[in-house]
Image: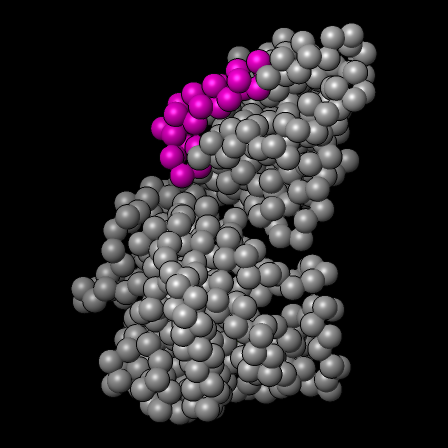
Amino acid sequence: MITLQGKGVSAGIASGVVVFLKRKSLSVEKRPVADVEKEVERFEAARRIASEQLDELSKKMAGTIGEENAVLFEVHRMLLEDVDYTEPITAIIKNEKVCAEYAVNTTGSRLAQEFADMDDEYMKARAVDMYDVSKRVIGILSGVEDDLTRSDEPVILAADDFTPSETAQLDRGKALALVSRQGSANSHTAIFARTMGIPAIIGFGAFLSGDLSGKQAVLDGETGALYIEPDQETIQTLEQKKEALRQEKECLEKLRGKPTLTKAGRRMKLYANIGSVGDVESVLAGDAEGIGLFRSEFLYLGRDSYPDEEYQYQCYRRVLEKMGDRQVIIRTLDIGADKQVDYLNLPKEENPALGIRAIRLCLNRPELFKTQLRAIYRASLYGNAAIMFPMISSLDELLRAKEAARAVREALAAHSVPFKRDVPIGIMIETPASAIISDILAKEADFFSLGTNDLTQYTLAVDRQNEAAAEFCDTHHEAVLRLIRMTCENAHKAGIWAGICGQLGADPTLTKTFVEMGLDELSVEPSGILKLRNLITQC
Ligand code: PEP
Ligand code: MG
């Protein structure tokens, strides 16, 4: 037995024969052409056919992968119409007097690389869409039909990578699972696999070689393990897990679309945490009732310069639009401590977790803060947004942050920029100070969300980053639980709601305690929603 370890992106157990996807090679040679005008016409004709195909695909696939996901083919169609795509293609044909296949391939590859080099995970994942679109056009130009080689028997499909078109058009009865050398968890391939319930593992690298074709295998899409020629014991263990998962899924699916009600009939909100625009797909697939924590700092991380107002506005708008009338709580920039970016030139601090981070940084740099607030307010028109300030530890900080928001509203109004005036403003309770004065803060906030990761760190004086101190980080410590209870009681006395968006919210051993405390909301990983709803109904 050989065990290969990849990254599980769609849970589930599958066993069968591995078959490498054979694609008919597409002609991309640099063929000279005499009549460039005719060649441009040939490209235009192929583009029209591709556009019609995508239109049909979008309608057809809505039933399989849901309208929400089928929109991707609309996006592909828009890429085809984009002048940034069509103009360079036409220019290459005309200037270099070469065939359309070559021009499409060169331009598609360049644009795909530009997407791949972007910092934003969502944009990065669009590289494969660019590749997919160009492959379609080249296929039409060269008369090569897409060929997903499938045997008559269902198989585990392996490939370097799968394009979204390939994944979406897979015959569900034939593809037991997908395994690939490359890929990203945010890619549409991964999203479609999850939506279609096909187990998928990506990122095996060169270990996933063509020699494995034809071999018997079993895999676990949750752990990311692929066992080639598995022994009897492994088969049996995974078969048992498969049956347990099947039973659990059947039970959980009954709760999809249902409100989250405690045993006593009290309604709770079950929200999800996200870090990027791309995560919204999982939020919807996971059946979350809203987004309880959008860690907006992820828009700032891993880049060389500030994300500008327009970029942020587009990101927030996309999330809000996708979520419709479900609430989206956008946490303002929580940078500093473990989250560092060079372009902010943050001074070196002895104890950065106790230094200029989160709201403190924003209050020190009003322009940085106001740029983000402007982007959020402008995007607020497109859904049900809320703003949340992190790391508040005093009333003064909250009042200053609210003043910044008020100033932004005034400025937008003065310039006749449309926005929603009544966006709720809440705060994270993640310092002992804020929990202790939560009665005072509650008078100035629309809601509380307990950041138990930091609340635990600061209450127990245990650095959350320090592995060596992990044994002293008792997340069930009575001090932490008392602060949560106190915060919840003070919120209710002031008539506002309180929830948890830290890791503790997903701890199944505390669900009953949280229900008894009267918490109104829990915000967890998107994949944990149905499980938690199930638990809450029993508490
Ligand atoms: C928390 O501190 O619990 C929290 C949700 O915020 P973060 O983990 O991003 O610091
Ligand atoms: Mg925190």
Is residue 288 inside the magenta stretch?
A: no
Point 30% across, 75% down: residue: 497
Q: Position of residue 145 (x, y in %)?
A: 60, 12
> In the picture shown, does residue 175 fall above or below 355?
above
Q: Position of residue 454 (x, y in %)?
A: 53, 78
- Residue found farthest to the left: 265
Q: Position of residue 106 (x, y in %)?
A: 75, 27
| Nearer to the camera, 120 or 79 | 79
> In the picture shown, does residue 59 fall above or below 510?
above
Quadrant housing residue 86? top right
Point 51% across, 54% down: residue: 315
> In the picture shown, does residue 404 fall above or below 394?
above
Residue 32 falls left or right of residue 472:
right
Residue span colored magenta? 45-70
Point 61% across, 32% down: residue: 83
Residue 148 visible at all: no
Is residue 52 inside the magenta stretch?
A: yes
Q: Position of residue 439 (x, y in %)?
A: 33, 90
Quadrant (top left/top right/bottom left/bottom right) for the N terminus: top right
Point 60% across, 61% down: residue: 308
| Nearer to the camera, 62 or 382 | 382
* Main SS of residues in magenta: helix
| Nearer to the camera, 467 or 41 | 41
